[in-house]
Image: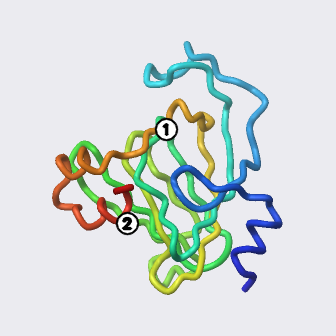
């Protein structure tokens, strides 16, 4: 297995604001007008975007939410656990991305728009290299990093996870 540094260097990945490393690999040339999008979008958006995203064992992807669905794809390394909190009822879903279906792992999974989600390499994983495809395309105007105190007030049943996946 190639080391994490190989992928970071090979794909010229940069630090991601939520943790780990990323590089945008695709941004559609065509644009959806704000008038054609749901009201939650504050402007025009590209049809779709895609990134490579790498987390090492000491990284977490902090809890955040976006206004689009996000499709995650597993590529290399060890399994990645994606934690999704549904705002309607506080239900927690744990998606395990990886290459071993016998261990409950999947190659791809969707995170619905508006849910709180974060991720970290599964126990024993040195790193996880995944991809994320967003449609309508990702825009930082649609990105909201979770505030620990707000999430703890709304979802106290997930205290340990929220504390692990939010900045202190």
The percent coordinates of residue 90 (x first, y second) are 23, 51
Closer to viewer: mark 2 or mark 1: 1
Rendered position, 36 above or below 81: above
Image x and y of residue 63, in percent: 40, 53
Looking at the image, is 151 positioned above or below residue 77? Answer: above
Along the line of sight, which residue is nearer the eye, 58 or 52? 58
Quadrant that contains the C terminus: bottom left
Give the residue displayed 51% in from the left and 74% down from the top: 58
Earlier-in-chain disc, 2 versus 1: 2
Residue drawn at x 51%, y 38% as measured from the top left: 68
Count numbered badges in the picture: 2
Q: Secondary structure at mark 1?
A: loop
Q: Which mark is residue 143?
A: 1
Q: Is residue 111 above or below residue 160?
A: above
Element assignment for label 2: strand
Query: Would residue 153 be found to the left or right of residue 46 on screen?
Result: left
**Spatial separation of the CA atoms under disc 2 and disc 1:** 21 Å
Where does residue 40 sit, x and y in percent of width and height?
A: 44, 24
Q: Does 122 sit left or right of 30 as displayed?
A: left
Which mark identifies residue 94? Answer: 2
Q: What residue sits 63% from the left and 26% below the top?
A: 45
Instruction: Name the residue rendered at 46%, 51% in the picture.
Output: 111
Furthest-front residue in this view: 168
């Amino acid at each position: 297995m190639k080391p994490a540094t190989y992928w970071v260097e090979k794909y010229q990945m940069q630090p991601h604001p939520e943790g780990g490393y990323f590089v945008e690999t695709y941004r559609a040339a065509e644009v959806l007008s704000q008038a054609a999008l749901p009201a939650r979008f504050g402007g025009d958006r590209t049809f779709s975007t895609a990134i490579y995203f790498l987390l090492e064992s000491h990284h977490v992807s902090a809890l955040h939410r976006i206004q689009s669905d996000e499709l995650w794809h597993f590529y290399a390394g060890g399994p990645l656990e994606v934690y999704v909190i549904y705002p309607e009822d506080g239900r927690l879903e744990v998606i395990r991305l990886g290459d071993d279906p016998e261990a409950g792992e999947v190659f791809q999974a969707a995170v619905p728009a508006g849910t709180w989600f974060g991720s970290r390499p599964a126990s024993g994983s040195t790193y996880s290299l995944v991809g994320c495809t967003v449609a309508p395309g990702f825009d930082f105007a649609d990105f909201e990093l979770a505030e620990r105190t707000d999430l703890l007030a709304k979802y106290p049943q997930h205290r340990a996870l929220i504390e692990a996946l939010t900045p202190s």
